[in-house]
Image (tube, grey):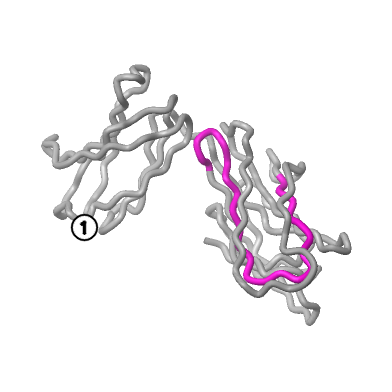
Amino acid sequence: MITAILTATSFTISNNATATGTVTGSIGSTANMATSFNHLYAIAQSTVPLPIELLSFSAEPEGETVLCKWITASETNNDYFEVLRSDDGIEFKSLGIVNGFGAGTSTTNRSYKFVDNDECTTIRYYQLKQVDIDSRFSLSDVVAVNCNTKENEIKLYPNPATNDLTFSFFQNSKDEITVEYLDMLGKLIRDEHFQTVKGYNKILTSVTELANGIYYLRIKSGKGNPGQEDRQIRFVKE
């Protein structure tokens, strides 16, 4: 996770880092640019109060769409948010507007979300624009989303796993899948069943009851989806 501390309407860049898709910080800067997955880390100081304090802004695939979420710790005369999207991280277009707190001040955490319903199959970039009631605006940092998941690929973390395990995969249709846990000899240790959506899926499960060792996680699609091949990935339980 990359942290950006943005506390003024202008700032100087201090160094580069690599973004993982979620940033935290405060909106109050002019736009900075991210190319590919490079992210800029900025520090500035100012006595001018910020319109909002942004705790987090993230975007991640959800089925065939992308879900953008953000949380504010405080807002002052915040009229609305505008969600922006780019295919190259440079030229952004507006997707839609989400109303903010409005006139006055909020000092409690407020959660927001916006769904980009355009089918996502490549790398996309998202940015949040915050607009005051007097039409002044500020921009968040840019987050990148990679929707270019191969149909037979499983991504899994953490690996090694101790308690919880998260795995993501692409499904070519809505289906009920069976997730099998096999030992190194191919013996079935346990299985689970999950409902999936067409497109990108992410599942969190517990592996606490598994004994320490090496396992294979295998995803088997239901009979109603004969075109989807079985997939498996190796992981370590410790």
Is residue 189 shown above or below 163? above
Depth check: give the residue in front, 184 or 67. 67
Task: Tell me where residue 122 sits by quadrant.
Answer: top right
Q: In this view, does 47 lie to the left or right of 182?
A: right
Task: Tell me where residue 91 sits by quadrant.
Answer: top right
Magenta stretch: dominant SS? Answer: strand
Is residue 141 shown above or below 221? below
Say whether residue 73 is magenta. yes
Residue 167, given in percent of the width and then of the height, sits at 36, 44
Q: Image point 66% across, 53% down: which residue? A: 142
Q: Image point 51% across, 40% down: which residue? A: 62
The residue carrying mark 1 is: 238
Residue kind at label 1, given as amino acid type: Glu
Task: Tell me where residue 174 sits by quadrant.
Answer: top left
Say whether residue 6 is magenta. no
Q: Image point 42% across, 29% down: which residue? A: 171
Q: Which range of residues does the magenta coloring cover?
A: 61-84
Residue 16, given in percent of the width and then of the height, sits at 63, 61
Q: Quadrant of the C terminus?
A: bottom left
Farthest top residue?
Answer: 226
Circle 1 Cα neighbour tier, 10 Å, few/some/many (<14 / 14–19 / ≥20) = some
Q: Can residue 196 be seen in this view?
A: yes
Q: Can residue 14 be seen in this view?
A: no
Farthest bottom residue?
Answer: 47
Depth check: give the residue in front, 52 or 21. 52
Q: Is residue 168 left or right of residue 75?
A: left
Q: Is residue 122 left or right of residue 198?
A: right
Q: What element carries label 1?
A: loop
Is residue 138 shown above or below 21? below
Residue 155, given in percent of the width and then of the height, sits at 39, 42
Residue 124, given in percent of the width and then of the height, sits at 63, 41
